[in-house]
Amino acid sequence: MKDRTFTADAEPGDHATVAGWVHEVRDLGGIAFLILRDKTGKIQVKFEKDEMDDELVETGINVQRESVVQVTGDVEEEERAPTGVEVTPDSIEVMAEADPQLPLDPSGKVDADLSTRLDNRTLDARKPETKAIFEIRAEVLRAVREYFRSVGSTEINTPKIVATGTEGGTELFPVTYFGEEAFMNQSPQLFKQLMVGSGLERVFEVGPIFRAEEHNTPRHLNEATMIDFESAFIDHEEAMDVCEGTLKAAYSAVEENCQEELELLGLADEFEAPSGDFPRLTYEEAIERINATGELDEQLVWGDDLPTEGEKALGDDVGGHYFVTDWPSEIKPFYIQDYDDDSELSKGFDLMHPRMELVSGGQREHRYDALVEGFKQQGLDPDQFEYYTKMFKYGMPPHAGWAYGVERLVMTMLDLDNIREAVLFPRDRQRLSP
Ligand code: ATP
Ligand code: MG
């Protein structure tokens, strides 16, 4: 629409055309108001029954809520209007009439449960609070991309249909690829590593990952969006620096550019971009601190993965983002490098939000022989991964990297209860449509 004015830009004195959804119609007898809503806000349209064309008035006061309309008229100052201005229309066109039976009330007056909201995301995302989450998510991704560019990283896109998974056969969704078995990729891990050995050296990707995890939790999806980073000639410590920088860049951008959205979500006062260096606890320190909280029924011992309650207890104890480093090799994947002087100890790390894990990363094994040995130790057949291991024979630099879950980043940033709030169309055990 060439001559459309957003409601937020309509100024007194303009003759403007606004377009959007009918938020509500209030008929007060001699006078009626139609509140029109668009992506920038709302504006009041005034109908004076005695002074205006009957057909115009009829159209304006009988249109169903959530219909799409276009209104042209004079914009005037009006103190009593919600935004201080109102439109006196000389024409109104109903572009799409809405059914009077709405499955969900976008004005938010009637609450809907999450499942109804997800079934009707289009209507749900007309609510300013829902829309705010996705505006912030977009800002996070924008800021992350900008940050990556500032540290000389090149955006790549790698295949999502693959012949083998990243970490073997579990948790993979099979698909049929021209009669052959293939899988939806569970991580770009191997591809991004192949690219640090290319002339690109330092790469990132924002893309979907697919995991056939059977559990149903508030922090797992079966299709998620991952932010992956990988760079040649850095170690795990430097990879953590970039990881921390990325997170801070995302928070700062939201703080700077999304005040309105934060307000809608009731977070404007408390929202704060993290400052200061994130503590880096070794795995050993982490389990000691968890044990010391006394929150777990059974004490953790070396080699245990950190249970959810343990992560929570430690998160409460630390009180902010922190890294856990120096994990036991046996609970980290084969592509993570071990310390030279202790093969039981890996250079893997996780970045934690007090509520949950956000990132896993590490220094990678770039030495061909050690890599192939790692495959065997984890019970994987190196031949199946020949496309990957082979490239380690032709000059693979030392490298490190990590991966974020975008939905977890947004969920923890905005203190959402359920990860499904942070994705438009979640894929989980119950949901394949829409
Ligand atoms: P968790 O132990 O919490 O299930 P993970 O260790 O299996 O996660 P990684 O393989 O380390 O996950 O993936 C890197 C990041 O991607 C995680 O830290 C998390 O932020 C995100 N992520 C992984 N799996 C999921 C999922 N099923 N749903 C949403 N995000 C996920
Ligand atoms: Mg992990």
Image (cartoon, grey):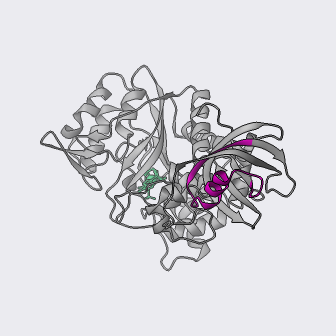
Q: Nearer the viewer, residue 209 or 167?
A: 209
**Above or below for 421 versus 391:** below
For residue 162, side relative to residue 282 (left or right): left
Residue 41 visible to an observer of this rendering: yes
Quadrant where the C terminus sits is bottom left
For residue 41, side relative to residue 118 (left or right): right
Q: Position of residue 40 (x, y in %)?
A: 68, 46
Q: Which residue is depicted at the point 63% across and 70% down?
A: 109
Q: Residue furthest right?
A: 79
Q: Position of residue 401 (x, y in %)?
A: 48, 38
Q: Residue furthest top?
A: 199
Q: Nearer the viewer, residue 258 or 194?
A: 258
Residue 357 visible to an observer of this rendering: no
Q: Which residue is depicted at the point 65% across and 61% down?
A: 24
The quadrant of the rendered image in which ligand 1 is seen is: bottom left
For residue 399, side relative to residue 129 (left or right): left
Specify start and end residues of the magenta stretch as a single range.
Answer: 47-73
Q: Position of residue 284 (x, y in %)?
A: 53, 59
Q: Is 53 included in the stretch rendered in magenta? A: yes
Where is residue 352, by image quadrant? bottom right
Q: Nearer the viewer, residue 267 or 104?
A: 104
Q: Is 381 included in the stretch rendered in magenta? A: no
Q: Residue furthest left?
A: 179
Q: Position of residue 102 (x, y in %)?
A: 50, 65
Q: Nearer the viewer, residue 430 or 388?
A: 430
